[in-house]
Image (tube, grey):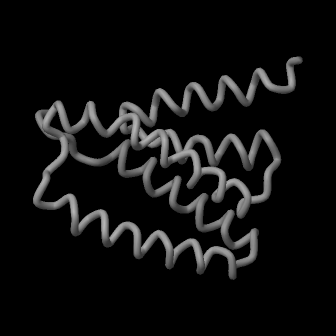
Amino acid sequence: MNEWLFPLLAGGVTGVLSGFGVGGGTLLLVYMTVFAGLDQHLAQGINLLYFLPAGLMALPAHVKNGYVVKPVLVPATAAGLVLAGAAAWAATALEVELLHKCFGGFLMAVGAMELFGKTEGA
């Protein structure tokens, strides 16, 4: 019975964070690779499937609150789709160890920007 409890909690917490726009998918990747022991390629595929319903559930609230800039929506979405497809294709050609290093570097860069970056109104 307990084998489903921790994954359920991880999915719930990352779902709430995704709704706030904090990057729950990134944390889900960390959970799946570090704690659940999944291969990086598999975790990335699951994360892509996870993002679709999470993003769709959060979108109406963000539109209602005026957080979606409509003139930018179509070009940003088009560029995101094309580049996500290209990056997913490139990731399948890379070794898992290199993916781990790239992802670790990405997390360190984002963490440094959050710690040392300037915030508006501060």
Tally of numbered tags: 0
Q: Is residue 10 above or below residue 92?
A: above
Which residue is at the far top?
1
Task: Tell me residue 34's x, y (percent).
Answer: 75, 45
Q: Residue at x 36, y 38 (%)?
A: 21
- Quadrant showing the C terminus: top left
Q: Nearer the viewer, residue 103 or 55?
A: 55
- Quadrant showing the N terminus: top right
Task: Tell me residue 70's x, y (percent).
Answer: 13, 53
Q: Residue at x 82, y 47 (%)?
A: 37
Is 68 on the left-hand or right-hand side of 12? left
Is 113 on the left-hand or right-hand side of 32? left
Task: Tell me residue 102's x, y (percent).
Answer: 59, 67
Q: Quadrant of residue 115?
A: top left
Q: Residue at x 57, y 45 (%)?
A: 50
Is 106 on the left-hand or right-hand side of 81? right
Task: Tell me residue 84's x, y (percent).
Answer: 47, 69
Q: Residue at x 51, y 60 (%)?
A: 106
Q: Is residue 57 above or below residue 77?
A: above
Q: Quadrant of residue 55?
A: top left
Q: Is residue 12 above or below residue 100?
A: above
